[in-house]
Image (cartoon, rainbow, N blue to C red):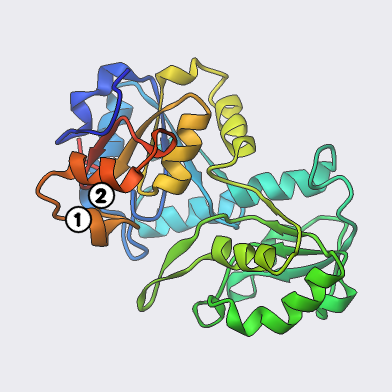
Amino acid sequence: MTAAACEISGLSAIAERFDHVLLDQWGTLHDGRTVLPAAHDCVLRLREAGKQILVLSNSGKRASANAERLARLGLPRSAYDGILTSGEVTWSGLRDRTRAPFTDCGSACFLITRGGDCSLIDGLDLVLVTDMRDADFILLGGLDDDLAEPDPWRDRFTGAAARGVPMICANPDLMMFGAAGLVPAPGTLARAYEWLGGPVSFVGKPYQPIFAAALEQLGDPDPHRVLMIGDSLDHDVAGARAAGLQSLLLGDGVHRTTLAGAPDLAAATRKLAASPGRMPNWTMQHLSW
């Protein structure tokens, strides 16, 4: 297996090395407005080459909502084999209550989500509370841009942390693309709660439950024949390496201020990764065949 961050010009250069592909969404397939043309073509080429494709996202929303969004942006459901989100893994965990952190988190839920979306708790036996002081646990699924910074939450978080109220973060991403560019994502807010002393459980990349669920959905293939493609060293690459998968980092995503246009993308990636646990096998600027 490739040791560390070799630059390639297109996915066709390494296609014989994998049978299954896990594809991140934001910064990989689309920019929030449209599916990137080269990425769209690449997905079609992957299907033609017989690869099994699973979209793997840290979205705090359910899988069906993400599939609908991808279709609106230009990638129909027929173009890939399945989609798995951290929101879907969280919803299933809260439904089944068979493993931590879902077994003993209680039923009174303070939900933090984007745009008032409540699909993360639809059909679940939970009581939605509007005052954090009444909550058994905090469920962080998404953030509106104007509430992305930790400061507006400080007072409420300080009190909840002092009471030991657990938080389940269904989107560990640290940064996200907002209307004005990159803004803090739910993972950053969860880290702020953790810094105040609050107990936090993260669901999604780079944590292993979502990768285990992805491999199960793919039919439990040899992990070494699975390629994770994404734009985050912290989430896509670190999670893939921990799960024994191959990984490809795209420079034109969350690390674009450092990597986009780098004269030696592989060298810049190795410097940014800084440790073996965050080192991708390959790198290229954007997803293309």
The answer to which of marks 2 and 1 sits earlier in the sequence is 2
Residue 108's spot in the image, x, y percent? Answer: 88, 66
Q: What residue type is labelled 1?
A: Ala
- Please report the residue visible at 64 percent of the width from the left and 36 percent of the height from the top: 209
Residue 188's spot in the image, x, y percent? Answer: 55, 64
Relative vertical location of residue 126 with respect to residue 249 in this rendering, above or below: below
Q: Which amino acid does label 2 sit on?
A: Gly
Residue 81 visible in the snapshot: no
Left or right: 128, with 26 as reference point: right
Residue occupying the far left of the picture: 263
> Where is residue 181, by image quadrant?
bottom left
Question: Could you say which disc has been placed on residue 260 in the image?
Answer: 1
Residue 69's spot in the image, x, y percent? Answer: 46, 58
User: In the rendered structure, are the residues bearing label 2 and label 1 in contact, judged by CB atoms less than 8 Å apart?
Assistant: yes
Cα distance, mark 2 to mark 1? 5 Å
Residue picked out by circle 2: 251
Depth check: give the residue in front, 251 or 3: 3
- Please report the residue visible at 12 percent of the width from the left and 44 percent of the height from the top: 264
> Where is residue 143, by image quadrant?
bottom right
Relative vertical location of residue 276 with respect to residue 63 in this rendering, above or below: above
